Image: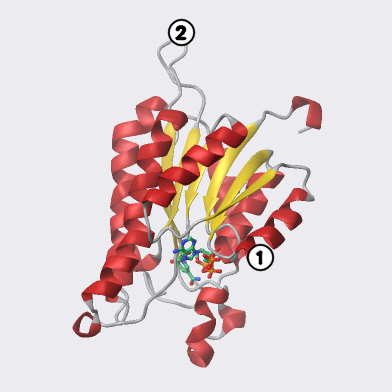
Amino acid sequence: MSAASEVFRAALVTGGSSGIGRAVAGVLAGSGFDLTLVGRDPDRLGEAASALAATGRQVHTLVADLGQPDRAEEAVDAHVTRFGRLDCVVSNAGGGRRAEVADTDRRALRRLLAVHVESAFALARSALPLLRRPPGPDGRVGETTWFVATASVSGLAPTPGFAAYSAAKSALVSLVGSMNAEESIHGVRACALCPGFVDTPMTAPLGGAIDAPGMIRPEDVAASMSFLLSLSSNAIVGELVIQRAGTRPFEP
Ligand SMILES: NC(=O)c1ccc[n+]([C@@H]2O[C@H](COP(=O)([O-])OP(=O)(O)OC[C@H]3O[C@@H](n4cnc5c(N)ncnc54)[C@H](OP(=O)(O)O)[C@@H]3O)[C@@H](O)[C@H]2O)c1
């Protein structure tokens, strides 16, 4: 698409400073989206923004801890103040937590649910008025907007040893299903990205338990975003499962 014919669009990516979020942000920038990136570490955000700005898109950063879900709502407000429109939300920020049910303390559970689930709901509720599009003269909404949540295969079948994490990711899959049922008539398309282990800083602590060269690449997950952008407004893809080669179904 030439720059002259490019449609201006804007996206908000939480956890856009690293790993999967950064790779998805790269796809969005390459597809003509200006960006707001959200994360806690200003240096990592700044570094990602500089790299993405090389695409020619505007990249705004916001330092926020989404363990406080009010910050998700503030992020949407800041994005709209900056860009005046919102076409895509990627609810991706978060980290893993290894603990069996027997070892899951409630404080850690609350924190994990706040970052992964409550923030995603807060983002969705704040963003929906901006993502909805009006119907055309034929009553159909031809324009598509996107709400993408980075869930996990652990959200489709619990991963032993990751009880709270699996529960949080299941909640994201459910949120996405509800959004498609309730909002697709307004042009909003939601998708839960469900990868197995991806080679990012999050999986580094797994040490040698999982061989990093055999992990899914962040760019593999980001290719999902290209696929979603390529779909016609007639189609919904509510879940995208990306597995490591050689694993059983739903094995991370
Ligand atoms: N890697 C995997 O194997 C895998 C598989 C399935 C799903 N996922 C999911 O993919 C998402 C991204 O993970 P990743 O693997 O790309 O890890 P990553 O490289 O560590 O990136 C995590 C991103 O989230 C941000 N973040 C974390 N906690 C945050 C908080 N409380 N508030 C705001 N931002 C926060 C981080 O920035 P700051 O640290 O600066 O805040 C960073 O930008 C997560 O939701 C994860 O559960 C990962």
Assign the C terminus to one quadrant of the image. Answer: bottom left
Q: Tag 2: Cα neighbours inside 10 Å, few (<14), some, or many (≥20)?
A: few
Q: Is residue 78 above or below residue 163?
A: above
Q: Position of residue 171 (x, y in %)?
A: 28, 57
Element at label 2: loop
Question: Can residue 175 be seen by looking at this rendering?
Answer: yes
Element at label 1: helix
Question: Can residue 245 be seen by looking at this rendering?
Answer: no
Query: Amino acid type of disc 2?
Result: Pro
- Kindly identify which residue carries mark 2: 137
Q: Position of residue 149 (x, y in %)?
A: 43, 52
Rendered image quadrant of residue 180: top left
Q: Is residue 142 above or below residue 115?
A: above
Is 99 positioned to the left or the right of 71 in the image? left
Query: Amino acid type of disc 1?
Result: Asp
Q: What number is the disc on residue 43?
A: 1
> How far separated are the C-alphas under marks 1 and 2?
48 Å
Residue located at (56% from left, 34% from top): 81
Q: Position of residue 61 (x, y in %)?
A: 62, 51
Q: Earlier in the sequence, mark 1 or mark 2?
A: 1
Residue located at (33% from left, 70% from top): 165
What residue occupies the far bottom of the structure in this picture? 208
Residue located at (60% from left, 65% from top): 18
